[in-house]
Image (cartoon, helix red, strand yellow):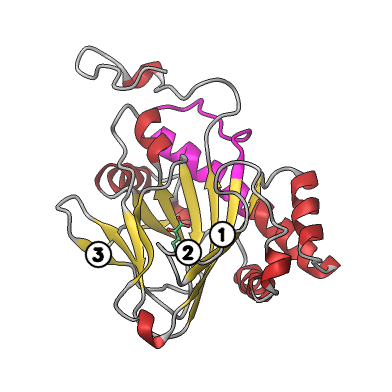
Amino acid sequence: SIPVIDLEKISEEEECKKVREACEKWGCFRIINHSIPETLMTEMKRVIGTLLDLPIEMKKRNIEVIAGSGYMAPSKVNPFYEALGLYDLASSQALFEFCNQLDASPHQRQVMETYGKATHDLAVIIGQKMAQSLGILCADFEDWPCQFRINKYNFTPEAVGSLGVQLHTDSGFLTILQDDINVGGLEVMDSSGSFVPIPPLPGSLLANLGDIAHVWSNGRFCNVKHRVQCKEATTRLSIATFMLASRKGNVEAPTELVNHDHHRLYQP
Ligand code: AKG
């Protein structure tokens, strides 16, 4: 199974080494003992469940700002999957518009804002630890924008055995995922090409590294391939915070990671 990183031990050398190994070998890990209260996670799950239950005409008001940021209706490719999205999470204007589109209540807004800030801050900390694990101490991810997506899988009895979401990598740097606490189905591909199921672990979060992490690390970090399989006829909910890439200029590997033995793999 995938590595588990204990955020309370993250300043210890041993845990930092585990982060590096997880990023190099898997491109993903479970995060336990993080700072996001379980009550907030539970409340957020409730809020997004309600929003995704809204009539389709309302969900369609959630329009795209960047590719893939708006409402995604069930499609031919992914008939059991739908999602609402927001870009970017750190913008109070964007969150305000998202909430207006969905007629969110003051309480729902409050929960989304608090949760958004908490996952953004966690992504920044984990980004720093990932950089630190490669010996880079000055990396600052504070200004990297986050895209936010709430996912619903309407699994019917006919869906069992088919895919909720196709095999893909995330395009950004780092995704903080709150998966469903009851319904499994998420699978990651390991280095041998086999699928490894990710069973739910209540209270924890998942870190998935995307394409930008691979480029930024000069090929050291793995961008994990993953998919969602329908295991049972029930609703599955998940919440993803995608930290994308710096607003300032192009993504390029820090000079510390480029030398005689490690040529620059990707030109900015
Ligand atoms: C994604 O949002 O990129 C996912 O792969 C979602 C995974 C999940 O629903 O657990």
Tag 1 secondary structure:
loop
Q: Which image quadrant for residue 226?
A: bottom left
Q: Residue 249 carries which label?
A: none
Depicted 74 relative to depicted 122: above or below = below
Magenta segment boundaries in residue numbering: 119-146
- Tag 3 residue: 196
Q: Quadrant of the N terminus?
A: bottom left
- Tag 1 residue: 72
The kind of residue tagged 3 is Val
Tag 3 secondary structure:
strand
Task: Give x and y (percent) for residue 141.
Answer: 56, 34
Task: Give x and y (percent) for residue 23.
Answer: 33, 44
Residue at position x 44%, y 79% in the image? 155
The kind of residue tagged 1 is Met
Magenta region includes residue 232: no
Closer to the eye: label 2 or 3 = 2
The kind of residue tagged 2 is Ser
142 left or right, relative to 182: right
109 left or right, relative to 17: right
Q: Do the residues labelled 2 and 1 touch (CB within 8 Å)?
A: yes
Dot 1 or dot 3, earlier in sequence:
1
Q: Residues within 10 Å of mark 1 (few under 14, many from 20)?
A: many
The CA distance from mark 2 to mark 3 is 26 Å
Residue at position x 44%, y 48% in the image? 10
Residue at position x 54%, y 43% in the image? 243
Task: Give x and y (percent) for residue 52.
Answer: 64, 71
